[in-house]
Structures are given as structure tokens and as C-alpha cells.
Image (spheres, grey):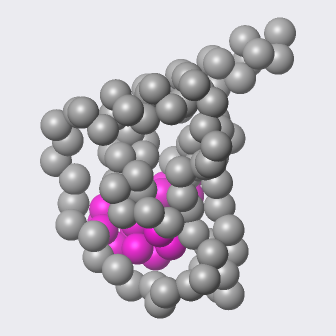
Amino acid sequence: MEAMEDFLKSVGALYDETRVELLKFIDMHGPLCVCDLEASFGMIQSRLSRHLKILKDAGFLSSKRCGRWVYYSIRSPLDRFRREVLEEIRTLPLELPELKKLSKECEL
């Protein structure tokens, strides 16, 4: 039953345009701070954090704290399903915002 729950959580996380855009954006730019994503997407922090938590709980993202910032990146390694999903997302013609980098470089 656990495998089914994991699968459904992963699929459910993808049923939102913003989360798919966030995955592609993070995949393109590498580890990003919540503040960078907030500025780039023009989204309030609480809404953004909810999307990031769903993607993390679904096994697509990992997070690391660096000082006062939390950086999100594509989890590594990804299993075959998530890797193939990400490959499909890369092919989607999404209109993503420009990266607005606010955070300082952090050794992750």
C-alpha cells in the first residue's frame, strides 16, 4: 500500500501548473532560495512554501538550509518515474519568468 500512496502523492503533486513550472525552473537554474523563487514568480512566501512542500513530499525536491535561507533543488538521485517525469517537463513549452536572484551564493 505504501508504494501506491507514494505514487499517488507524486502524481497529485504534478496536477498543478505552478508546481510543474517550479520544477522546470529549479531544474533549469539549479538550487534556488525561496526568496529567489518568490521574487521570480511574484508569489507570496506562504503560497510558494506550500507548493515547495508538496513537491518535496512527493519526492521531486530536496532542501538545504544555508544561514537564514532554505535552498531547493531537484532531488538526487531520482527514481526512474520521477526522472522520466522531469524529462517530459523539460520538453513542455512553458513561459517561465526570468530569474531574479536575491540570495547570496551559498556553499551547498
Q: Residue 71 in the image: state x and y as whole percent.
A: 57, 69
- Please determine whether, in this image, residue 11 is positioned above or below residue 37: above
Query: Is residue 34 covered in magenta?
Result: yes
Q: Residue 62 in the image: state x and y as whole percent.
A: 64, 54
Query: Is residue 72 covered in magenta?
Result: no
- Please determine whether, in this image, residue 19 is positioned above or below residue 74: above
Quadrant in the picture for the N terminus: top right
The residue sitting at 42% across, 56% down in the picture is 26
Quadrant in the picture for the C terminus: bottom right
Q: Residue 9 in the image: state x and y as whole percent.
A: 64, 25
- Residue 17 makes an appearance in the image: no
Q: Which residues are magenta?
A: 32-50
86 horizontally vs 4: left or right: left
Name the foreground residue: 81 vs 47: 81
Name the foreground residue: 79 vs 12: 79
What is the tally of numbered marks visible in this picture? 0
Question: Magenta: predominant secondary structure element?
Answer: helix
Q: Residue 27 in the image: state x and y as whole percent.
A: 41, 52
